[in-house]
Amino acid sequence: MALTVYAPASIGNLSVGFDILGAALSPVDGALLGDSVTIEQSEHGDFALNCVGRFVDKLPTDPKQNIIYDCYLAFRREMAEIGRTDEVAVSMTLEKHLPIGSGLGSSASSIVAAFYALNEHYGRPFDEAKLLAMMGELEGQISGSIHYDNVAPCYLGGIQLMLEKEGRISESLPVIDDWHIVSTYPGISISTAEARAILPNHYSRADIIDHGRHLGTFIHALYRGDGELAAESIRDVVAEPYRKQLIPGFDEMREQMMAQGALAVGISGSGPSVFVITDSQQKAEAMHRWMQQHFIRNDRGFSHVCRIDSLGTRVLEETA
Ligand SMILES: Nc1ncnc2c1ncn2[C@@H]1O[C@H](COP(=O)(O)OP(=O)(O)OP(=O)(O)O)[C@@H](O)[C@H]1O
Ligand SMILES: N[C@@H](CCO)C(=O)O
């Protein structure tokens, strides 16, 4: 039996909630914007990993350097903890659709798809909370510190708020129905670890107060169903002022998007992808065209008009 699992792209931070907010994305044209992993029993008794897809070229060439292999080892360790030591190895195929260092939660997408697939294959030994904890730990291995703002929305869908309480790592927030989100990857790469290293270690009291006010207003507005207020409070005092210089043309892009009726503009995760929120598909399509003409730097870049993905990670195909 082979099983294919798809894990969507995500926007970490959503600008207003550094490390504690994230949203999953689903292109309106039905395209799949996320990695997928196919799993089946290994024929030779050893773990095997095959990598394919548009963005496979920047992955480590040694499969044992791929984060999928670390997921497999971590999963087997956890199974041994619960007394499951006799299980046979698997063969996995990663379809890499998200570019590395894109700000679209590329490593998170691989990690989440891998853990979800492993859990399905071995008969669901772990519950949602345990799986999410494992996903966060692996994501932390890559970027240097545990943050769930990509793995949680990628796994669970929607807009997720990180509570990071025992057994309640993340919970869903209400979604504004008419939001259309333009998600654009300009084609260059930014390492998450490096984008974290350039941030200040300390922030001023004024920044802390602004951050708390914007985040509080955002969550309040979502619960009130007030999309305009929610979008207006998407303001980033923690990362954007420091990271935007890593993204060529960011200020001009922001100005253009606001002039075209954007409700909010921000850096997706640690960049260089950006997101633009607007209240109609028509406006979003016009912004998407502008992005294609002016913001994308090379043929690796792409842009999509998206909605919030409510499904999260799911099984795409199961064959006997
Ligand atoms: N399956 C995989 N997917 C993505 N990155 C992987 C994978 N396996 C190993 N890596 C390594 O993990 C690192 C990921 O780097 P980084 O965290 O900056 O990117 P990212 O997670 O792709 O970023 P983003 O969240 O901004 O999309 C790279 O060094 C990459 O080679
Ligand atoms: N919250 C993380 C997301 C990385 O995609 C950061 O901004 O560093």
Image: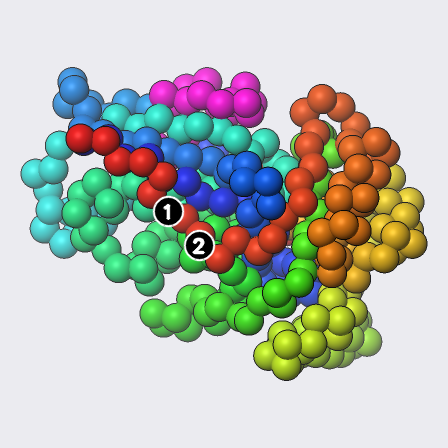
In the image, the segment drawn in magenta is 50-70
User: Quarter holding the C terminus?
Assistant: top left
Residue drawn at x 55%, y 47% as measured from the top left: 26
Q: Place residue 195 in its image quadrant.
A: top right
**Crowd rating for badge 1 (residues with CA inside 10 Å; few <14, some 14–19, many 20+):** some
Per the image, the residue denoted by label 2 is 311
Q: Place residue 118 in its image quadrant.
A: top left
Determine which of the numbered discs, if any, sits on residue 277 in the image.
Answer: none
- Whether residue 307 sits left or right of residue 50 in the image: it is right
Per the image, the residue denoted by label 1 is 314
Q: Amino acid at mark 1?
A: Arg
**Label 1 to label 2, Cα distance in Å?**
7 Å
- CB atoms at circles 1 and 2 under 8 Å apart? yes
In the image, the residue with mark 1 has its CB under 8 Å from the nearest atom of ligand 1: no
Q: Position of residue 44 (x, y in %)?
A: 16, 18
Q: Place residue 278 in its image quadrant.
A: bottom right
Label 2, secondary structure: give it.
loop
Q: Can you see residue 138? A: no
User: Quarter holding the N terminus?
Assistant: top left
Q: Nearer the viewer, residue 125 or 239?
A: 125
